[in-house]
Each structure stands twice: as structure tokens, then as C-alpha cells.
Image (spheres, rainbow, N blue to C red):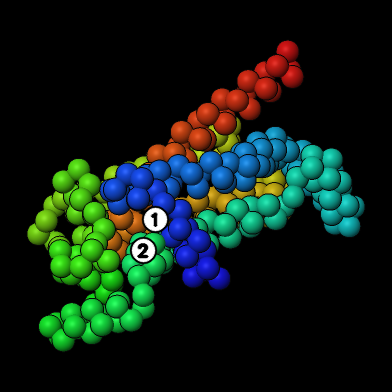
Amino acid sequence: MISFFANLFGYLLNLLYNLVQNYGLAIILFSLIVKVILLPISINQQKTLKKSTKIQEEMKVLQVKYKNNPEELQRETFDLYKREKMNPFSGCFSAIIQIILLLSVFYLVRSPLTYMKKVEPQIIEEYTAEISEQSENRDAYPEISIIREKAAEDDRVYINMEFFGLDLSSIPSKDFSNWKTYVIPVLYVITSFLSIRITTSMQNGKKKEKSANGEEPNELDMMAQTNKNMAFMMPILAISISFIAPLGLALYWLTNNILMIAEKLILNAVFKKKEEEVNA
């Protein structure tokens, strides 16, 4: 399934590359288009976040009221979700989409000749074998090596990887001496935690607490905590990969982070304005 999406995304990325003739610019445009396509999911996510914060107190009241009647508590909780039109599993769908995107783009950037340029497998295999004979170490990104070593003599495997003085085919873990390879990953790290900080601050500044009766956190609390853990785990996973993958992948994630931050701020402002109009 991941290969299917990587192949599909490859057509779009190749179309953009043919328009701008630069891999970095094509990735930025690709990121923007994907973000626009997924905007409805982002809007639903933001609505869920708002509803989650809104009914926290109602859940705590129900816990106190029905602390000795778990069946009634469960029934009232279900009614609350239904009344607020909130699906407790909506966060799971969003997480699945993020994982599919992460892996698909990783496949695409790791093997741009296969998924983007649609180069014949035989050509890739021949060049891979030739490069392998010249090196004792196994290459984790053979297609990137082909682009770096064979693009000058074969237009079929040429991709313009130069982007504002950076070579997007570079891999930070393989080029410790070149500080430029760390610029994009470091910016990605900064924007990742900035995005997390913004998301956390949107929870109305309320800290997670135990319910008023001293019981364990309710289902909504646990769902919020799960979403919070996911918000931290996804960037950490991506950060780890960005240091061992070609810079093109880190550029995509960096662009996506910047767009995500702008999206969150804009949507939050829109929803806040609507709430003020309703309460007025």
C-alpha cells in the first residue's frame, strides 16, 4: 500500500519538477498541494480539539455524579459524545493518515528514480550493481548514489538537487564534516517543537488533572493524553529519520511543519471568532 501512494505522489512531484526544474522547489509546492488536499481533515482535527477542551469539565462532573454507578456513567458519557457529535476514535484516523504520508514520502524521496522519474528497473539495477562493485559498504540509498555519480553522463537519472547552496541528495549521517547538511534537519527540529507548543497552548491553558473524586482519568482525559503522546512521538520519529535520510525528506517535513503552524494559527483564529459571535 505504501508503494502505491509513493508511486501516486511521484506523478505529482515529477509534474511539479518538470514545471520548476528544481527538486527543492518541487518538494515545497508538493507539500503545499498535499496540505490543501488534507485541509478538511485538519479542520475536523481542530474542531475535535476544541470540543475535547470544552467538555472536559462536563466529564468531570459526570464522574462525580455517577462515581458509584459505572453503567450510568458510561451511558451519560456516550450521550455526551453523541450530543457534541464527537467521535472518540477520530484521532486514530488522523494518526493513520500521518503515518501513511510519512512512510510514502520517505519511499518517494529514498527512491526518486523509481517513484518520481519512473526510470526502468533494469537501468537502476545496472547502475546499482556498478556502484556496489566500487564500494565495500552497502548503500542504504542506491538511487541517491546513482543520481550523484551517474547523472552527469545519463540524463535519464538526472535530477537537479541543488537548493540554495544545499545538495538535497546529501545525508547528514554520512557527511558529518559538512555543517550545511544539518541546516534543514535543525530547522525541522525547531519547528516541530514550536508546533507542539502551539497545539498545547490551544488547550485553553488547562493542565491534565485527575477527576474531582480522585479516580483515574476518564476516557476523554486518556484520549487527550494519547493525542498528546502522538504529537510528541511523530516528530521524534521523523527527526530520527531526517538525520539518516536524504535532505529532500527533511525539506518536505520542514515545509510541512511551517504550513502546519500557519494552518493551526489561522484555524484557531477563525474558530475563536465564531465562538465569540455565538456567545455575543
Residue 202 falls in image quadrant = top right
Q: Position of residue 212 (x, y in %)?
A: 71, 43
Q: Position of residue 182 (x, y in %)?
A: 21, 52
- Image vertical order of residue 194 relative to residue 272, above or below: below
Name the foreground residue: 41 vs 3: 3
Say if mark 1 contacts mark 2, CB within 8 Å.
yes
Name the foreground residue: 115 vs 98: 115
Q: The residue under label 1 is which amino acid type?
A: Asn
Q: Which residue is mark 2?
A: 117
Q: The residue under label 2 is which amino acid type?
A: Lys
Name the foreground residue: 227 vs 12: 12
* Secondary element at tag 1: helix
Lower sequence index among marks 1 and 2:
1
Picture residue at 56% right of the left edge, 45% below the top: 37
Picture residue at 29% right of the left edge, 48% below the top: 21
User: On the picture, is 279 further left or further right than 259?
Assistant: right
